[in-house]
Image (cartoon, rainbow, N blue to C red):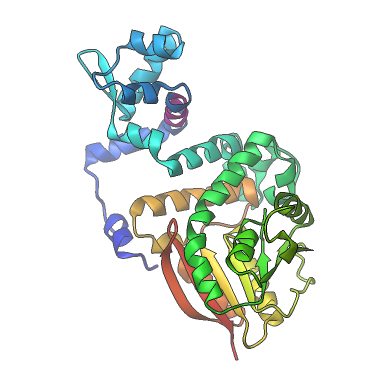
Amino acid sequence: MKLSPALEKSYASERLSALQAQRLAHEISFGPVVFQVSRLMVKFGIMQLLLDSAAGLTTDEVSAGTGLSRYAAQTLLESSLTIGTVHCAEGRFTASKAGWFLLNDPLVSVNMSFNHDVNYLGLFRLEEALLNGAPEGLKVFGEWATIYEGLSELPAQVRKSWLDFDHYYSDAAFDEALKVVFARRPRTLLDVGGNTGRWALRCTDYDPDVRVTVMDLPAQVEMMKRRTAGRKGADRISGCAADLLDRRAPFPAGFDAIWMSQFLDCFPDEEVTRILARAAASMSADATLFIMETFWDRQRFETAAYCLTQISLYFTAMANGNSKMYHSEDMMRCTEAAGLEIENIIDGAGKGHTLLVCRKKQ
């Protein structure tokens, strides 16, 4: 298994002393507590108060400033002190560097809301999900086979956090991806797994002549139509309702470009190969297929690889029970088996995305 140089440096050998390793093991054992304390330090405004106070605050001052009881303020501050998100000197608490990131890093905020609202309760059933190959944790919200089937029916806050998470990771890469896709001047584009139509709208805004078809589950296509209605370029966006797991359902033919962004990670690798093979069967010799994914092994920074490999367990417990954030070699193997060849690989788009530019084998 190949890794980027940064990941090779971090993961090839032991980096911790015995005491550091013991500390990490205890942090893991109290992980749920650490997560909830840190989330509430932000939600209750404690971290913001500390960052706004150059001299720091006492427990009583935090209590008064937030309206929390002294007991609540004290337990959260003392826990955070040993977590490492605050410091304390002469009875006055200040925010640490980690506390600053906890409050100000937008990716931390998105990940925290996603894990609290979407994953937290369901992860209790991760063991069952791994053993059964099914998203057993999803049952906390409903009896769907996958989260995608029930997305439009999820509780409002859960759906918001899911969409915020999905959009944050993808939107940052769109600017660079648009340049790559439209350098080939496609007149028609099939957006597979287009969800709410954000990419489709970006395409019609970028090129005044392109026509985009969003292919997704029926409920998703209806949600896409509602969210794009009345927007500039929406008259050049249409929907194609389909269950991508239905192996008998062919891909619509005749498109200059096929786009799959953060889509194939929603399927196990054998299904990825089948989907790509059906896409390849619909392609002409001149058509191009674009795959945009956040491959954990091609990340420039180790923290990104950490986040992505943890996100894999969302797919296990909540999404479908059998997919993950892929290692790039696995995805490349699937494209090869599907009858495609990779023409170009573009790393570093947006938040660590990789763009695979594929052609049908001749």
| Relative to 353, residue 104 above or below | above
Specify whether residue 39 is painted magenta: yes
Judged left or right of residue 151, residue 48 is left
Q: Position of residue 66 (x, y in %)?
A: 44, 14
Q: Is residue 97 above or below residue 89?
A: below
Question: Along the horizontal axis of the image, is 61 left or right of 260?
Answer: left
The image quadrant where one finds the N terminus is bottom left
Between 310 and 15, which is closer to the camera in this rendering?
A: 310
Q: Residue at x 58, y 43 (%)?
A: 126
Please state the horizontal and vertical placement of residue 123, each as a whole percent of the image: 57, 39
Residue 318 left/right relative to 326: right
- Please report the residue visible at 25 percent of the width from the left and 22 percent of the height from the top: 54
Question: Residue drawn 38% across and 25% down?
Answer: 48
Q: Chief secondary structure of the magenta span?
A: helix
Front one among 70 and 156: 156
- Quick check: is 338 in the magenta stretch? no
Q: Tell which of 50 and 185 is nearer to you.
A: 185
Q: Residue 68, percent across and down?
A: 46, 11
Residue 30 point in image, percent of width and height: 42, 30
Q: Quadrant of the C terminus?
A: bottom right
For the record, the magenta segment spans 34-40
Q: Is residue 268 visible?
A: no
The structure residue drawn at horizontal position 66% and vertical position 43%, both measured from the top left corner, is 136
Give the answer, above or below, for where 165 lies relative to 338.
above
Residue 258 visible from this viewpoint: yes
Work out whether 246 lies above or below 121.
below
Total tally of numbered discs in the picture: 0
